[in-house]
Image (cartoon, rainbow, N blue to C red):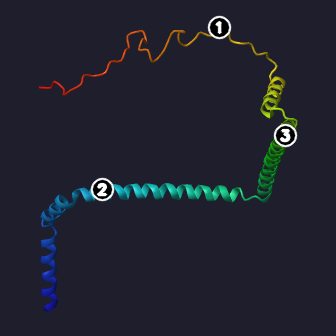
Amino acid sequence: MEAEAGARVRNEAVLQNQDLSFLLPSVTAFLSDYGWYVVFMCVGVYLLIQHLHKNRSTDSQSSSVSAASQDPESVVRSQAALEASRRRMQEEQDARAAEFRERQQRLEEEKRRQKIEMWESMKEGKSYRGNAKVAQQNTEEATSSSSLRPKTDKKPLRNSGYSPLSGDGGGTCSWRPGRRGPSAGG
């Protein structure tokens, strides 16, 4: 009897729960309170799944490519090519460094020679600045092959009768001091 009563209760419960209309008020209340959070969470889960799917596909492709490129001969060739390019770049850098050192030594030698010339001219009682200018002009003449011509077409900035203290500046822009006393505001 008890088995029949238990089966009857289960049948009644199943019949009562077939209609899910009792969930409708609670689901609508949940969505009205947290609806935007649910939407954003669904979008985030979708983007996360897309990202993971893309990473998995690239990982599987790279593992197949890396397995194919693990051929010992190709690895040795790529390492040799890499070593050769590094050696070539190092040789270029060494050549540039040697050229720079040589240029620096020439400049230092030139400066030392000029200092010696200035010191000798000072010992003789001559002006060492004049000799330095002459030496500088000699180096400039040696470096530049074009001759310097004086500029005779130069126009003077002001006429010869201009004096800034006289107040006759000419033109329309003359300065006048402001009025003394309080302003005439209203």
Residue on which disc 1 sits: 153
Question: Whole-Å distance between the Cαs marked 2 and 1?
Answer: 78 Å
Residues packed near mark 1 inside 10 Å, few (<14), some (14 to 19) or many (20 plus): few
Helix, strand or loop status at disc 1: loop
Question: Whole-Å distance between the Cαs marked 3 and 2?
Answer: 84 Å
Of the pair 84 and 116, the residue shown nearer to us: 116
Q: Amino acid at mark 2?
A: Phe
Q: Is residue 151 left or right of residue 183?
A: right
x and y percentages locating residue 168 in the rendered image: 42, 11
What residue lies at 47% left-to-right and 57% top-to-bottom?
A: 53
Give the vertical position of 122 relative to 64 (above or below): above
Residue on which disc 3 sits: 119
Give the vertical position of 161 relative to 112 (above or below): above
Residue 44, quarter of picture: bottom left
Residues packed near mark 2 inside 10 Å, few (<14), some (14 to 19) or many (20 plus): few
In the current view of this chain or complex, which residue is farthest to the front?
A: 125
Q: Amino acid at mark 3?
A: Trp
Give the vertical position of 17 relative to 73 (above or below): below
Residues packed near mark 3 inside 10 Å, few (<14), some (14 to 19) or many (20 plus): some
Q: Marks 1 and 3: in contact by CB < 8 Å?
A: no
Residue on which disc 2 sits: 40
x and y percentages locating residue 52 in the rendered image: 47, 59
Q: Amino acid at mark 1?
A: Asp
x and y percentages locating residue 15 in the rendered image: 13, 72
Q: Nearer the viewer, mark 3 or mark 2?
A: 3
* Disc with the residue nearer the chain's start (3 vs 2): 2
